[in-house]
Amino acid sequence: MQADPQANPTGIGPIILHSRDARRGRVVTAANATARALGAVPQMQLTQASTLCPEAQLIEQDLQADIESLCSLAESSQCFSPIVGIEQLDTQPWAGRSLHQPQSILLDITGIAPLFGGDAKLAAAVHRWVLDQGYWASIAIANSVGTAWALSNYTRRSQIAADLAEIERLGNTLSLLPAITIAQPNEPIGAAIYPLAIEALRLEQATVTKLHRLGIRKIAQLVELPRSGLASRFNEQLLQRMDQSLHNQCEPILTLHASPELAIEECLEHPTPLRTTIDAIVTEQIHRLTRVLDTIGHGVVRLVCRIEMELNAIPIESDIENQSGQPPPVARVFQIGLYRPSNEPQHLLWLLQGQLDAHYAKGPSHYWARSISIQATLTAPLTWQQSDLFDRHSTIHRDAIAKLVDNLSARMGRAAVVAPSIQRDPQPELAYSWRPLTGWRKDGKIQETKRKLARTPKRDFSEQQGLEPDSNELWRRPVRLLHPPKKIDMQQVDENGNPLRMVYQGSPLSILRATGPERIDTGWWQGATQQRDYFRVELSTAVWLWVYRDRREQNWYLHGEFD
């Protein structure tokens, strides 16, 4: 199916955001107006959406990055109100929401509107600020959290969709009229949300389905029913949401406090070429930074030091240009990564001094230091737990091992000190990857920043149905893999396709036993599909090999060797 060119005059094609669901695989999380016009909707499986929109641009959505961006935006919005929070989710997703994660920011503007000239001017100022941040938002002002949420999410829902389509038609121009709704204080309580759908009360899907079966689709119909009947037929959430939206029950805002500034900068009154002065400033900054980290219980995982330089002497001709023919940089930037979070000043100073010794002294002598700054670009909580009674020998040297890894990474580079990480991929050469041991958490997980927002599932199928072999199947995968696989000449196979005799590097080899085949097919999203039949073969020399037949090329390859 092709998009109608008249409906999309600017040529902006369909765009689909997708993420991985533990039960359903890849699903659509969001789609632009062009993709929706072709039939792609949220929570649709990605394969189905790709069939409807074969020309769609598929982008994997980073849900954690979205949450962190929302938290950052909420912290920045404290320029309008000292009380700022993010909507709190229930254990079950709300009806009408495609993602079970926060998408709204709450501001308590009690007594603040007169400073801007009224509610309308305050809302307009917030909308301009949101546009300056690169976002487009729907804003509502009301006397309760429930009413404001309902008005912002459902009052102009159809108009918002039309506005977003107009934005795409104009080439992503965010200069349309703002979507602002203000509940009038003199109108009856709850009258502003009576015409809205019952999904605006933030109810679970099961409750909304029951109400729809009874013919109740608007909030006005719901409030006319007797309260005793609602209490007996539905759960307590329905009455609680009604009371919160109709101002009968207070709903607090859990404030989001801004993170402390983890950057320290010092501008020198006069530029200096003295290394001793630079070392003294860096030492003081490290101690100040670790004191701030102590207050929040975090340690440094990645640290960046920047020294801005200034030309303060008559340059020598050989110093003006480096080997590439370009003038030397006006700033020196050094970065260190750590294996485990640390706030020990002496350890951080030792790592940073090594970077200064290796790089700073090699620069031109006529460039002097003008300002020095350090910043912790990545931190993690310092977690302490008591070791097991018989686990002393595995933990006694834990700190020493972490410092050894930090020192090796500082001297050899992050990319030189790595560890294997298992990837869920059926193709053997893609079933692992190498990740640096320093610069991020040692377990490879995302940093704990507003991540635990939903309850843990009762049963995590993704952990039980992995693609990697079971720990008991010792002979299923070899320890040593050849990269890339070596082509071999399979001279003889039996009637079932099992290998009997092969030639490798000019030597004929007899196969005593062959176990297989194990068929592996890769996913379409990785390019050309790989179709392989793997065999574990035992040679006459008592060596076990792992070979496969490419079903597309009908060639044989040696991929691994068992120890």
Image (cartoon, rainbow, N blue to C red):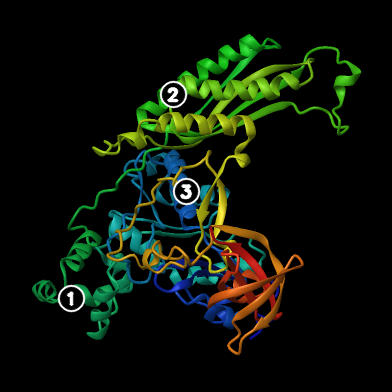
Which dot marks residue 444? 3
The residue at 56%/48% (across/down) is 435
Tell which tag, 1 or 3, sits nearer the viewer.
3
Dot 2 surroundings within 10 Å: few (below 14), some, or many (20 or more)? some
From the viewer's side, name the closer residue of 317 and 251: 317
Residue hosting label 2? 344
Residue hosting label 1? 224
From the viewer's side, name the closer residue of 296 and 23: 23
**Disc 2 element:** loop
Q: Are marks 2 and 1 in contact (CB under 8 Å)?
A: no
Tell me if 278 is positioned left or right of 102 in this view: right
Across and down, in percent, residue 319 comes to: 85, 20
Mark 3: amino acid: Gly
The residue at 43%/32% (across/down) is 299
64 above or below 540?
A: above
Across and down, in percent, residue 389 comes to: 23, 37
From the viewer's side, name the closer residue of 339 and 18: 339
First-in-chain label (2 vs 1): 1
Which dot marks residue 426? none
Tell me if 527 is positioned left or right of 130 in this view: right
Dot 3 surroundings within 10 Å: few (below 14), some, or many (20 or more)? few
Across and down, in percent, residue 308 comes to: 68, 23
Which quadrant of the figure contains the N terminus? bottom right
Tell me if 183 is positioned left or right of 524 in this view: left
